[in-house]
Amino acid sequence: MGAVAMPHKATTAKAPLGEELVRLTGVNQTYGRGTRATEALRDINLTIHAGEFVALLGPSGCGKSTLLRIIAGLLRPTSGEVMYRGKPLDGINPYTTIVFQAYALFPWLTVQENVEVVLKPLGLSPLQRTKRALNLLDRVGLDGFELAYPRELSGGMRQKVGFARAMAVEPELLCLDEPFSTLDVLSAESLRGELMELWISGAIPTKAILMVSHSIEETVLMADRVVVLDKAPGHIMADVPVTLPHPRSRKDRALLQLIDQIYATVVGRTQTEAEELGSAPGEPGRTRPLPHAQISAISGLLERVNEEFADKIDVYRLAETLGESLNDILPIIEATELLGLARVDAGDLSLTPLGQTFAEARIQARKEIFAARIRRVPLIRWIRTMLDRAPDKRLTWEVFTTALSLELSPDEAERQLETAVNWARYAELFSYDGDDNVLFIEQDTPLPQEAGE
Ligand code: ADP
Ligand code: MG
């Protein structure tokens, strides 16, 4: 487990903010012209100082990659000012390197050679190049694979070579463009841990990190600031500081609260959440019943709307397009609203930025979004808390239907529980065992970064 653990030593308090590295003022980017023009970024103002790990969060197409390219000097924005270390940036920014989603390695070079090759332009001697390459490969956990070829490595290991290569040139600002999104869960976790270790321990001379991410959880686990973007055109919605000490745990209360706070931003809540969500059984106030919508129907609807309807769609037309009766799709729409994935206004349905992110995300990120959202739903929270307190974390189905029957008809109590289980299973919050007729929480294989807690 050692290799996959997040750093568990005490936090090295990073020095207070250092010198200003990046300063973007009023940056706009429009691709193309005339009717073909796409406004990718509007009025971006962003400053990054030495010592900061900044995350950029937002749905696909909100201009995250464009922003990185501008900072790296690969793209000159349509208008606005780009400063690095107080000087206007002109051409390629020599202080930064970008690590992309899938790192392009030379297939004919070994792992070690793939790292050494980028050191040649730095004017290091062959011996120095080798030393530096071996050192970084060791640090990212590739000791023993120096002579392997990329095709012999797993996706996670190839991405590690990419990291080693990016860090070998010792960029002052390390830019990461969704670096973990193509990796399986364990490889991603391992690589996150290694990056955090290098960063927090100060083992790399990198002074700041700018990371694009799709995952709210990932950003609050790693970054000091989360800059939230929305699209059409890409603009900054919020800039949220994360001051929690490292190592951070996924289960930490303050961290979960922060995740909720960021979700609320992405969802654009107006009503207070408590009002909207109702209360749990046994609490004062009305228990808000869950709309009976299956996960597959919720995902399907979000995908369709995201793909086919740019902005918003009339709810009646949506029913027609999907070939369903209005009665069948209303619970699905209600579920997407309850979860902050869509909004209905004057009969038109539109996705929230979170809903767009969900529609475009892979399965694991979808589960994460879903889990974070339904954890706040009182009925689900109530079931989860009851199970958490139960011996063996198991309780019979009847325990819950009985409690629910105080407020609902017996039929509706059954259906509520069925829907709750359908949602919670997908989000991996709790599950149901038909043989024993019990709800239960997996006696979990702890998440890797929480090993030893
Ligand atoms: P993100 O990385 O957040 O997904 P991008 O920066 O890749 O967003 O893209 C932002 C917007 O600009 C999208 O609408 C995209 O289609 C558009 N875009 C990006 N690159 C180009 C390009 N080279 N030419 C035209 N449009 C582009
Ligand atoms: Mg991108």
Image (cartoon, grey):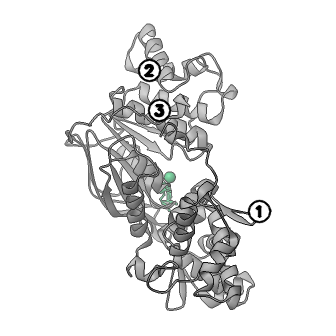
- Residue 365, image x, y percentages: 57, 56
Residue at 41% in and 74% down: 268
Question: Which secondary structure, mark 3?
Answer: helix
- Which label sits on residue 119? 2
- Residue 246, image x, y percentages: 36, 41
Identify the residue position indicated by label 3 in the image: 194
**In this rendering, the label closer to the viewer, 2 or 1:** 1
* Residue kind at label 3, given as amino acid type: Glu
Tell me whether circle 3 and circle 2 mark residues in contact (CB < 8 Å): no
Residue at 30% in and 42% down: 90
Identify the residue position indicated by label 1 in the image: 436
In this rendering, the answer to whether 366 lies above or below 221 is below
Q: Earlier in the sequence, mark 3 or mark 2?
A: 2
* Residue kind at label 2, given as amino acid type: Leu
Q: Nearer the viewer, residue 164 or 297?
A: 297
- Rendering quarter of residue 428: bottom right
**In this rendering, the label closer to the viewer, 3 or 1:** 1
